[in-house]
Amino acid sequence: MIEGQIPIEEYETGNTKHKWNLDKIKKAHHKVLEYKYKKGKVEKGFANRTLYINLSTGEIKEKKVTDEMKKLFTGGRGFGLKLLWDSIKPSTRWDSIENELLITTGPLCGTTQYAGSGKSLCLTVSPSTDIICDSNVGGFFGPYLKFAGFDAIEIQGKAKHDVVIIVDGEQGKIIVETAPLEETNSHVLSEQLTYMYASEDTDKSRQKISVVSSGKSAENSYWGCLNFSFYDIRRKVCRMKQAGRGGLGSVLRNKNIKAIVAKVENFDGMANNPDDVKKILNVGTKLHREIRDLDREQCNMRAVGTVHLVEIMDEYDLLPCENYRFGSFPKAPKIYSPKFFEHFTKIIPDGCWHGCTMACAKTVDGFEVKTGPYKGQKVTVDGPEYETCGCGSNISLWDPKKILEFNFYCDTYGLDTISTGTGIAYYMEMYEYCILNKERCDGIELCFGNFEAVMEFIHRMAKGDKGEFVKVAAKGIRRVKEWIKEKGWGDPYLIEECGMESKGLEYSEYVTKESLAMQGGYGLTLKGPQHDEAWLIFMDMVNNQIPTFEDKAEALHYFPMWRTWFGLNGLCKLPWNDIEPANNAETDEPAKVPEHVQNYVEYQNGVTGWNVDKEELILQSERCYNWQRAMNVWMGRGRRKDDWIPYRSMGPVTEVEYMSRKDRYDKQLLENVGLKEKDTEKMSTNEKVKTLYDWKQDQYQKLADAVYYRRGWTPNGVPTPQKMKKLGFTDKKMLNMLQKKIDEDEKNGLNKWGGTYKKGEKPPSIDPKYWEKW
Amino acid sequence: MEKKSSVPKTVKVLKFHPEKCDGCKTCERACSQVHFKTDEGGEKSAIRILKDKNGKYKMHVCDQRGVCLDMCPVGALTRNKKGTVILNKKVCIGCQACVAFCPIGAMRKSDARIEPFKCISCGACVRACPNDALELVEVTIKGIKEVVYYKQGAEK
């Protein structure tokens, strides 16, 4: 084990060392496109231009970022939405030639004085959902892209052969060249390219390179993720962070891009050229000190990263076990954070961007791979994070080493661990019910806990296996549901309600059965069931702070807006509430962490020179949030039916689940549904399951009613033109489109509330067309 | 696992003799001359002389324990051949992690620039002190070295 204070040159990971013939690999490159640009300076957080590359037509150009664009879309994900709106069509699908892959930064991205300031926001039309997905990711690429001269990179079209795209901030050049000989898998590819494009053979030079890549599985799956590299000068390894959700890696490989490389000439703590660095230093150093003094007592991020959540989730019955059937499991302590702590390398500055003292990016170094093409090699595994451990419990892997192997291969093959884990968990449950079996699964015995089968499935995806199951399964739960139903292999209720996907995207790893607000947090989202919009379980279920539909709707307005804000600026959410000031509990609204919100006000003003307050921050988000929902509507989704969630996320689908928490559900039948004890005594478990089902479904529809109303949408979930105008939008194409869609809904009788309101209960507004009076 | 290398075993640290100090702060002015080419002292000095409640003088300065070494994301902080913890301004990216995590607040930050500064055991203050209240003494690094990581382990 490594002691501290080792000179940087002497750190050893014990990894297998590679020797590449880089000259040969480089000589095989053939230049396809080259574009020279004038190197610029970042002013108050903005490079003030974006980069457009069309791989089909060969066009490369710069687009100006106007003040109007900053005013309406702020930056980051907002810019991404604006650029997509200008470039795609409502019929665009993930593999359409006009689909784009965007990597955006945001005005605060690349700051070194405030923890968590190196995030990139990636957008595309997702293969899983057919609408826009956005995914945020650490690593050096975002900051380097901006310091090389661009607030965003926008790639349209498809290359004929595998290419790498180089954004060379040293030379002021964009180069696209073929790359036939490099490996595709990320942990090798990012190392090869980092060594190839570094100006000198030094760690310092390699640290100025960041590579975005995916892997072999992304070519054959809808679960493809993007790996963003960051060179670790201590470990001497290209470490990686993942933009996991929504199939961004699948789009990258579909465009025949092997990698995108960003290179900076130089950068320092003032590279963002902030308006008033003192403002940032004040709040930044204050936050560093909070982390120093309080992290160990709060989240312990600096020691174990997000894995500290495993034991908490297990304790509160929220850790997904065996495809979300259960929220805790007797074997769970085997994957609690101390078990991973034993494997983690103890090196301190584990931030995925400089200056992040949360340092949650832990690694296991010298990990010996047990299966597949890299068997026997020793590698660095980045992670696991909580979500990946949650996949472990979901597929019943109760061994840190197995979870590490799963994590390593998902990353290097370019697979999103969350979708892969949640997907496999569903297939395993179907296997248990004999809806799937060995023959139907192309010979893979996908039963809970079968580690060898999990790895075999992943390796076969990477190889491009032509088996019917492997091919469908690689596209995710939604497609497998259709496939099984088509084959007529089982009860459609089980097939539909057990599979944890909504909008076509797999759930992330929390059990939401007992928190209605959190069901909304997953279901009433833009891109699909992902906890980055809202995490309300404790507020709702444990602390009972939001009892009414109105309260829940307010939370489902504020928190998604607030959390969206990080993505507009290129920030990480963790330093907001995974560290709290010592006196936070005594404030008016502890869940909002008011002091940190004020930090962000100072921070944004300090960089941009704007003069905003905390209300304006929410407004910035609200504009982009509504714009994205409106784009979903434009693409034929974004209505109440699309906010459907599987019943597994609301309550017990099966009798086994009911019986496993019998007291809880019996109590709900009496206290919430309003049955009498003498009625329930006569009921069979099956009848109880059904009664609870009807009640919970209605609760969810009532929640949707309240939330749509709070957000200023129609009862069918469409942002109204009136709302958009209030937010400052005047784009005629957008406003007319929304009015047209609302009129269509009206014709089809869809502009009505979804809940069943009995005597004494009221919908959010008597007039379902309340917005017309605005 | 100590490796064979030129890792220094000892380091010079400042020792203070409060009974000799008269609070003239000549040392601070000498120090700010080293770091900022000014004799303002105070915020621009790595060594600070403070008066405690009882009217006694105290020295506040880096003791070279090196917690900051493991904090720097870019490797701007190292021990030099003499064992002194030094900051390379050209490499530093001004993240302030070392400033905030120094357990005694001896990594300093002045408004003059974004990169912090600290005592480099150069002896300018020792030479400047008219009363011989300061001296540089050699101590073993093993004896003072401090690593924060293990103390923040998962076991609570």
Image (spheres, coloured by chain):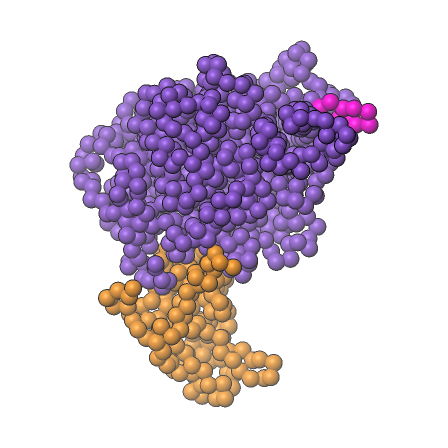
Chain colours: A purple, B orange
Viewer-closest of A248 and A393: A393
- The image quadrant where one finds the N terminus of chain A is bottom left
Viewer-closest of A439 and A530: A439
- Residue A277: x, y in percent? 51, 54
Q: Is residue A686 magenta?
A: no
Q: Residue at x 62, y 41 (%)?
A: A537
Dividing the picture into quadrants, the one containing residue A319 is: top right
- The image quadrant where one finds the C terminus of chain A is top right
- Residue A443: x, y in percent? 35, 24
Viewer-closest of A64 and A51: A51
Is residue A88 visible from the viewing direction of this image? no
Magenta segment: A755-763
Q: Residue at x 49, y 52 (%)?
A: A301
Above or below — where is A348 with respect to A265?
A: below
Viewer-closest of B90 and A370: A370
Q: Residue at x 49, y 85 (%)?
A: B18
- Residue A562: x, y in percent? 60, 40
